[in-house]
Amino acid sequence: MKDTAKHQGLRNQLVQIVEQKGITDKAVLDALKKVPRHLFFDSGLADYAYQDKAFPIAAGQTISQPYTVAFQTELLQVKKGDKVLEIGTGSGYQTAILCAMGASVYSIERQNELFKQTTLLLPKLGIRPKLLTFGDGYKGMPNYAPFDGIIVTAGAPIIPKPLMAQLKIGGRLVIPVGETIQIMTLVIRKSEKEFEKHELGEFRFVPLLEDKN
Ligand code: SAH
């Protein structure tokens, strides 16, 4: 697995595209420049990695479009040392972006095949999330809560209550909500009982799978 000057060049171009689409957070753009997205693809498909597109990965899932990753990450307002929960590890690309920004990342994946694959891949790339688990993201990770940020990378029919409960006061939950089309939704916990909700446009994700554990 190699990262070359050619890949860095393609990455810089991709970051320009993402910037033109409206992403301004420098920490997010720097992370996108740093993380070798092609290493999250099967080797034969690496040429597709630097297009601003989603792409199929194992178990019928997708690696999110770079713009979408950037958009969600910008909404999270990640600071170094923040504790972030990710629902839907998938390829591990979003996990890697959060790690590159200095977050302490906890991530849950519901497909065992992807969980195993990504658990092997990340250390090979020198990426060290705090914890990768196989399980049901609807429940979050109550044992490790509360979190500064929670990011859901699959389309959720509803906002799961346990995720709201696992936010710190001031914490941010970024979640695409809807069945066929999703509305990117930002929930900010203002106090123990008060949550502020913002809706930020339409996206398309693979569905958040129902609890079958
Ligand atoms: N962040 C990933 C996106 C993967 S697509 C990436 O950058 O590659 C969404 C992922 O959510 C899929 O891997 C899917 O298996 C996972 N998923 C779906 N339902 C889930 C659930 N209930 N709990 C945890 N993960 C889930």
Image: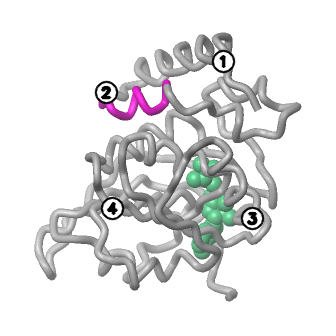
| Mark pair 2, 4: CA separation | 20 Å
Kindly identify the residue that appears in the image at 48 percent across and 82 percent down: 139
| Mark 3 vs mark 1, CA separation in Å | 26 Å
In magenta, the rendered stretch is: 24-33
Badge 3: residue crowd in 10 Å (few <14, some 14–19, many ≥20): some
Q: CA distance from mark 2 to mark 3?
A: 32 Å
Q: Are marks 2 and 3 in contact (CB under 8 Å)?
A: no
Q: Which mark is residue 60?
A: none
On the image, numbered disc 2 is attached to which residue?
26
Q: Earlier in the sequence, mark 3 or mark 4?
A: 4
Closer to the chain start, of discs 2 and 4, is 2
Q: Does the magenta run of residues contain 31?
A: yes
Q: Is disc 1 placed on a helix, strand or loop?
A: helix
Where does residue 125 sit, x and y in percent of width and height? 63, 41
* 82, 14: nearer the viewer: 82
Q: Residue furthest bottom?
A: 213
Task: Check if mark 1's residue and mark 2's residue have beta carbons within 8 Å.
Answer: no
**What is the CA distance from the residue labelled 1 to the residue labelled 2?**
20 Å
Q: Which residue is mark 1?
A: 7
Camera-side mark, 1 or 2:
1
What amino acid is found at the position of numbered circle 2 in the picture? Lys
